[in-house]
Image (cartoon, rainbow, N blue to C red):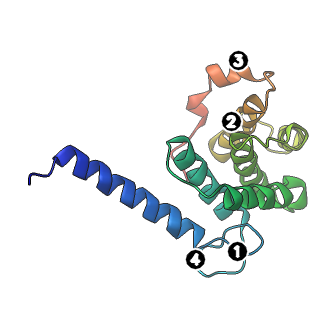
Amino acid sequence: RAVDPESAAKHDLEAMVQSGIDRLFSMQTGHGGFAYWPGGNQPVVWGTAYATHVLLDAKKAGYPVDAYRLDQALDWLAQNSDAQKGRHYWHWGQAAYASYVLALGGRGNKAAMKRTLTALEISRFARRPHGWDAETRYLLQAGLYLAGDRSYEKQLRNPEIEAISQER
């Protein structure tokens, strides 16, 4: 019996994606956030944002993602990602990404995103944005857009890409 190569490739892809989803869930803690390693018990904001982003994309692409566990991740992220809890400006970038992911998940907190964006704009980093500052602003503006705030639509349609550097 001949095996259709296209069908086999699709099956392999689906199996790989499902394996990735299962691997991510093996890193989810009892609190709902994600640790860096399977079986870890300390959730981290950036890792939770990243894992949740992947899960939201997988769900959008039609892959089965456990809705309860995804809700737990979004709940944890909403409770633990506000930049105001951070002590250093680099927390803003982490909070911006978490805010963007929450907005993707339908839970964008416009007040928190505006607060972080305002703090960034009045900080010593208010000069023309570059590198991480530009990416942080872009993520916050995109998160606000996803949450229904169109005040940065013009900037999102015409981003200052020269402000983004290759430095990561």
Q: Which one is earlier in the sequence, the residue at label 3 or at label 2?
A: 2
Q: From the image, tell me which residue sits under label 4.
A: 37
Mark 1 vs mark 3, CA separation in Å = 39 Å
Disc 1 crowd, CA 10 A, few/some/many (<14, 14-19, 20+): many
The span from disc 2 to disc 1 (Cα, nearest Å) is: 30 Å
Query: Looking at the image, do the residues carrying marks 4 and 2 touch, with CB atoms under 8 Å apart?
Result: no
In the image, 110: left or right of 53?
right
Q: CA distance from mark 4 to mark 2?
A: 29 Å
Quarter residue 37 falls in: bottom right
Image spot of residue 63 (x, y percent): 49, 49
Q: Are the two marked residues, 1 and 3, in contact with CB atoms closer than 8 angstroms?
A: no
Q: Which mark is residue 138?
A: 2
Which mark sits nearer the N-terminus, 1 or 3? 1
**Residue 135, how many percent across, how many down?**
65, 41
First of labels 2, 1 by sequence position: 1
The residue to which callout 3 is attached is 154
Q: Nearer the viewer, mark 2 or mark 1?
A: 1
- Front residue of this view, candidates 13 and 151: 13
Q: Residue at x 64, y 64 (%)?
A: 47
First along the sequence among labels 1 and 4: 1
Could you tell whether 80 is left or right of 163 in the image?
right
Which residue is farthest left?
1
Residue 155: x, y in percent? Answer: 69, 22
Q: Nearer the viewer, residue 110 or 126?
A: 110
Q: Earlier in the sequence, mark 3 or mark 4?
A: 4
